[in-house]
Amino acid sequence: MSLKGKRIIGGIGGVFVLIILFIFIMTWCYPYSPFSVKKNYAFQPYKVLHNGKTFREIFKDFKGSYENDLKDDLNNKVPNLTIDRTQYVLPIFEQDWLVSKNSISIDKMKLDTMLFEVKQVRGILLSLLVQVDYTSEQRGYLVNNIKDLLLLEEDITYLKNGSYLSRNELNRRLRNLAAEFTKNFDSFVTFYERSH
């Protein structure tokens, strides 16, 4: 093989190595980019302590109390709609990336599912607003919950469409999103406790 042929093969090999290196760097630095091979981000949930309890413990305590309320409500001739509809609201707060202790892979499909579920819950809360005769205080809590869900939708949509978010920015935004879910849960619990 001539020297010219070796240079051409070396040049092609160099370009090939540069392309692979570029794809590796894009996959690592910008997990959701179009150049990324694996379009997901491994999110490590953090402990959110509130009065010495993690979010998982707080959620579990509320869910246990709620299940007792639900059993008691089954004996009523006319079910309490707030208690009944809460069973459809709780799953958005029980997502694995919020309650797990392990690293969770978050891809665009997971974000789509999350967005869909938040929209469904917002619809449920809007139907409660129309169907149940709440006091003005209870209605105010419910309206605040609906507004908070709209903000969650915006944050999830931004993450879903953020093809060039860096790892650091993704981590920060996912931590903020987890904090927003926690805040929304606290707000929903306040509404629930005041309205059933």
Image: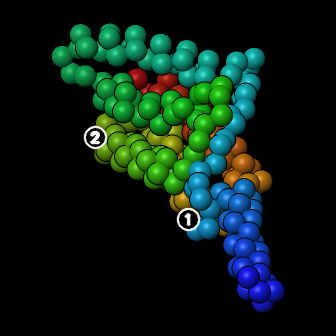
Q: Secondary structure at mark 2?
A: helix
Tell me residue 120's x, y (percent). Answer: 37, 46
Residue drawn at (49%, 47%) of the image: 110
Q: Is residue 119 above or below residue 17?
A: above
Residue at the extreme left: 77
Tell me residue 177's x, y (percent). Answer: 63, 46
Q: How busy is the neighbourhood of tag 2: few (under 14 within 10 Å), some, or many (20 plus)? A: few
Residue at image mark 1: 161
Give the amino acid type for the residue marked by disc 1 in the picture.
Asn
Quadrant in which the N terminus appears: bottom right
Q: Earlier in the sequence, mark 1 or mark 2?
A: 2
Tell me residue 118's x, y (percent). Answer: 45, 46
Disc count in the image? 2
Residue at the extreme front: 1
Q: Secondary structure at mark 1?
A: helix
Can you tell which quarter of the image residue 29 is in? Answer: bottom right
Q: Distance between the Cα atoms at labels 1 and 2?
A: 35 Å
Q: Is residue 19 above or below residue 184?
A: below
Give the amino acid type for the residue marked by disc 2 in the picture.
Gln
Instruction: From the image, state whether disc 1 or disc 2 is nearer to you.
Output: 1
Q: Left or right: 196 with respect to 110?
A: left
Q: Is residue 88 above or below residue 52?
A: below
Q: Nearer the viewer, residue 16 or 113?
A: 16
Residue drawn at (31%, 44%) of the image: 127
Residue at image mark 2: 131
Q: Nearer the viewer, residue 173 or 81?
A: 173
Marks 1,2: beta carbons within 8 A: no
Residue drawn at (59%, 33%) of the image: 98
Residue 129's tag is none
Residue drawn at (51%, 30%) of the image: 94
Quadrant in which the C terminus appears: top left
